[in-house]
């Protein structure tokens, strides 16, 4: 999706090695980053280090920032947050270690000589049982180190409940970038909570390091998700390998978080973007005034994320979706099945049942809208992995939008609405296209999401 022009331009300049661009970004955001890091760590020196680290990271790998997925300010904040949380975890781990060592239990862990595979299996019932069978002192030590002493025994590795999808993945890497697992640093062992005497490093930590070395900004979050999604150590290694090779995290996991839902996403299908939640919010608001169950159509549906999210929020709904890409339609069918939705394959509205003509309450379409000339400048994760048909909007990026706008009035019920995502700079032309099609256009934006959309209403 077309990014904020200012941020996209800054990225280009950073990629070109323009030091003034770095100075600009630093002047603008270093105060915010420092405040954020300080708030999380409550440690002035750490906050300074983290601030420094964030801007060094931006300078060294500016291509890892994907303007399409959000503002630079947000990305820097997420980076700082991730670093600050790492720092606090290390501090906690150090404290835990000293507490354990003070009780002479660290030696028990050390002597247990737990290898990576065994650590992996602490996630499993088998090892949980094995841990229960350990002598008291050893069991307490292991639990202290790996379970944070929680009564439920929920491992620190197993958090899948967080609904945060790391919105960035590995950035592009130069061919010479390290992709192999780096040697474990002493800090890695500390994060694992049993460090200091040269024995066990948590595998999650080694994965975090590996992902980080490959340019993954949210390495901690990604490691947790990959670990939770893997079917054993060999599978985990394969997933991490795919991620390190630059595949989008969502393809590796097989799902993306969108509007609080877990949306199945197969490789080659457009990964739903957080900003598209604006279309969902608007659709849900507009449907509140329509008779129930309303009829919703999602054109250019991709995985069907938008339709699925609308259905989840609205309740009973008659749902139809279509996409030209068979892989997308397969995905959409899976995602829309719980809501009883239908997904068709074909060009725009061509495959829709004609019985829907004049009866659609909301027609939503996140069409491709990247101008063709800008495709080459897209981040590699999108450019190399998502299909061109999902991105390319033609010369000015509005080819598909114009076609959908022209077709929409024939499908909309009187008072029905067409909703299409666009970008700030395309908004005026997009609104003109809606008006030319006989719809009454309205612009909606959400600064937090960095999202812009045009809503067109069929008045008569
Ligand atoms: C930007 S993606 C959006 C996917 C999904 N709506 C979402 O937000 O995650 C655009 C989608 O439009 C589909 N598409 C492009 N041209 C199309 C056409 N002429 N007819 C139907 N679908 C098309 C692509 O296959 C792709 O899935």
Image: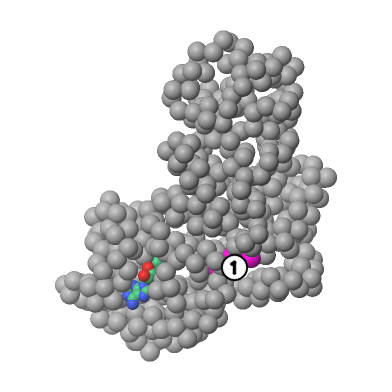
Q: Residue furthest left?
A: 355
Residue 71, image x, y percentages: 62, 65
Question: What colour scheme governs how the chains and residues are painted in the rendered image of this protein?
Answer: one colour
Q: So how many labels did they put on this image?
A: 1
Residue designated by label 1: 67
Decide which of 445, 235 is in the foreground and name it: 235
Decide which of 458, 200 is in the foreground and name it: 200
Q: Residue at x 24, y 67 (%)?
A: 344
Question: Which residues are drawn in magenta?
Answer: 63-68
Vertical side of 314 occupied by 85: above or below: above
Q: Is disc 1 surrounded by few (<14), some (14 to 19) or many (20+) residues within 10 Å?
A: many
Split into quadrants, the picture shows ligand 1 in the one at: bottom left
Residue 55, image x, y percentages: 75, 59
Decide which of 317, 138 is in the foreground and name it: 138
Q: Quadrant of the C terminus?
A: bottom left
- Which SS class for mark 1? helix
Q: Residue at x 32, y 69 (%)?
A: 325
The image quarter in which residue 28 lies? bottom right
Relative to 49, 183 lies left or right? left
Q: Residue at x 61, y 18 (%)?
A: 112
Q: Residue furthest right?
A: 45
In terms of secondary structure, what is the magenta stretch mainly? Answer: helix
Q: Does residue 67 show up magenta in the picture? A: yes
Residue 264, image x, y percentages: 37, 53
Residue 32, image x, y percentages: 74, 57
Decide which of 319, 46 is in the foreground and name it: 46
Q: Residue at x 31, y 72 (%)?
A: 324
Vertical side of 249 occupied by 130: above or below: above
Q: Does residue 64 show up magenta in the picture? A: yes
The image quarter in which residue 300 lies? bottom left
The image quarter in which residue 16 lies? bottom right
Vertical side of 429 occupied by 159: above or below: above
């Amino acid at each position: 999706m077309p990014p904020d022009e200012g941020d996209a331009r800054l990225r280009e300049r950073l990629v070109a090695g323009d030091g003034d661009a770095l100075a600009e970004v630093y002047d603008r955001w270093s105060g915010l980053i420092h405040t954020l890091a300080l708030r999380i760590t409550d440690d002035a020196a750490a906050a300074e280090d983290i601030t420094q680290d964030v801007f060094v990271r931006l300078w060294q790998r500016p291509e890892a920032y994907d303007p399409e997925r959000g503002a630079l300010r947000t990305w820097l904040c997420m980076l700082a947050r991730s670093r600050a949380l790492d720092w606090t975890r290390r501090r906690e781990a150090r404290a835990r270690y000293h507490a354990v060592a003070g009780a002479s239990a660290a030696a028990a862990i050390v002597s247990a000589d737990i290898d990576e595979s065994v650590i992996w299996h602490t996630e499993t019932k088998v090892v949980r049982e094995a841990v229960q069978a350990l002598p008291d002192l050893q069991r307490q030590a292991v639990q202290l180190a790996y379970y944070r002493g929680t009564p439920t025994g929920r491992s620190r590795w197993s958090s899948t409940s967080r609904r945060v999808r790391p919105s960035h993945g590995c950035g592009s890497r130069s061919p010479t970038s390290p992709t192999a697992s780096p040697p474990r640093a002493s800090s890695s062992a500390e994060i694992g909570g049993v460090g200091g005497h040269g024995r066990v490093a948590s595998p999650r930590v080694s994965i975090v390091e590996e992902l980080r070395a490959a340019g993954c900004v949210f390495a901690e979050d990604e490691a947790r998700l990959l670990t939770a999604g893997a079917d054993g150590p060999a599978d985990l290694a394969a997933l991490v390998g795919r991620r390190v090779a630059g595949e989008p995290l969502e393809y590796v996991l097989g799902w993306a978080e969108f509007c609080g839902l877990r949306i199945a996403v197969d490789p080659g299908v457009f990964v739903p973007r957080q900003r598209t939640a604006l279309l969902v919010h608007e659709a849900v608001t507009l449907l509140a005034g329509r008779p129930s169950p309303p009829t919703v159509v999602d054109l250019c549906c991709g995985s069907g994320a938008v339709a699925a999210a609308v259905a989840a929020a609205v309740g009973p709904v008659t749902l139809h979706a279509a996409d030209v890409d068979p892989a997308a339609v397969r995905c959409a069918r899976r995602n829309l099945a719980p809501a009883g939705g239908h997904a068709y394959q074909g060009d725009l509205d061509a495959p829709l049942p004609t019985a829907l003509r004049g009866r659609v309450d909301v027609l939503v379409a996140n069409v491709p809208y990247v101008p063709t000339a800008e495709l080459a400048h897209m981040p590699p994760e999108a450019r190399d992995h998502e299909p061109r048909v999902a991105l390319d909007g033609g010369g000015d990026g509005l080819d598909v939008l114009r076609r959908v706008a022209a077709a929409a009035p024939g499908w909309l019920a009187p008072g029905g609405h067409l909703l299409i995502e666009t970008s700030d700079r395309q908004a005026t032309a997009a609104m003109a296209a809606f008006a030319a099609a006989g719809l009454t256009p309205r612009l909606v934006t959400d600064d937090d999401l960095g999202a812009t959309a045009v809503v067109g209403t069929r008045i008569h």
